[in-house]
Image (cartoon, helix red, strand yellow):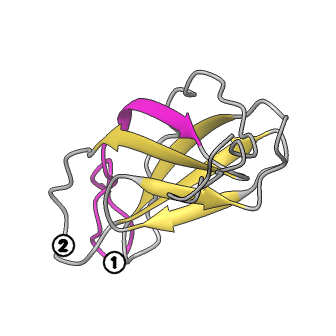
């Protein structure tokens, strides 16, 4: 009888990432989350954050994940999934709250010799 949570390679299913939050940048977002427990075979777990809308992704071996190529002025939420080196994925996390990337305000430098 097969053991639940295992695939044929013996890799265990990782727990679901939790506490997903996002902060907006310029055409990007930084997605942070609590790393899940993984008690399977050795090997690095890859975490993938996916935007909604658009399905734009970013990945990393830990938190946080930067998701780039977003449209400024559009609101996005993000989910995170963990995948083992054996192709076994966790359940999809709950979505983050919505963030909206924006262009940063211009930065002006006033020369020291400037007099109005």
Query: Magenta region, mostly helix, strand or loop?
Result: loop
Give the structural element (helix, strand or loop) at label 2: loop
Residue 9's disc number? 1
Task: Say whether marks 1 and 2 touch (CB < 8 Å).
Answer: yes
Write down the region rendered in magenta: 1-24
How would you rate the neighbour count of disc 2 (Cα within 10 Å): few for under 14, some for 14-19, many for 20 or more?
Answer: few
How would you rate the neighbour count of disc 1 (Cα within 10 Å): few for under 14, some for 14-19, many for 20 or more?
Answer: few
Of callouts 1 and 2, the N-terminal one: 1
Instruction: Report how far apart the C-alphas of labels 1 and 2 lie in the structure.
Output: 9 Å
Q: Is residue 103 above or below residue 2?
A: above
Residue pictured at 42% horizontal, 67% vertical:
60
Percent x, y of residue 44: 27, 74
User: Toward the viewer: 99 or 109?
Assistant: 109
Percent x, y of residue 29: 59, 47
Residue pictured at 55% horizontal, 59% vertical:
113
Q: Is residue 14 above or below residue 40?
A: above
Q: Is residue 11 magenta?
A: yes
Residue pictured at 55% horizontal, 27% vertical:
96
* In the image: residue 49, left or right of residue 19: right
* In the image: residue 47, left or right of residue 27: left
Q: Is residue 109 above or below residue 33?
A: below
Percent x, y of residue 86: 39, 76
* In the image: residue 12, left or right of residue 27: left
Residue 41's disc number? 2
User: Toward the viewer: 48 or 6?
Assistant: 48
Residue pictured at 70% horizontal, 42% vertical:
105
């Amino acid at each position: 009888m097969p053991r639940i949570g295992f695939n044929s390679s013996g890799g265990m299913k990782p727990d679901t990432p939790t506490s997903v939050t996002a902060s907006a940048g310029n055409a990007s977002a930084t997605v942070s989350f609590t790393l899940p427990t993984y008690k399977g075979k050795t090997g690095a777990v890859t975490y993938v954050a996916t935007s909604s809308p658009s399905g734009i992704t970013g990945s990393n071996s830990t938190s946080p994940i930067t998701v780039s190529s977003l449209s400024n002025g559009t609101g996005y939420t993000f989910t995170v999934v963990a995948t083992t080196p054996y192709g076994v994925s966790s359940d999809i996390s709950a979505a983050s709250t919505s963030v909206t990337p924006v262009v940063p305000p211009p930065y002006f430098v006033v020369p020291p010799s400037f007099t109005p």
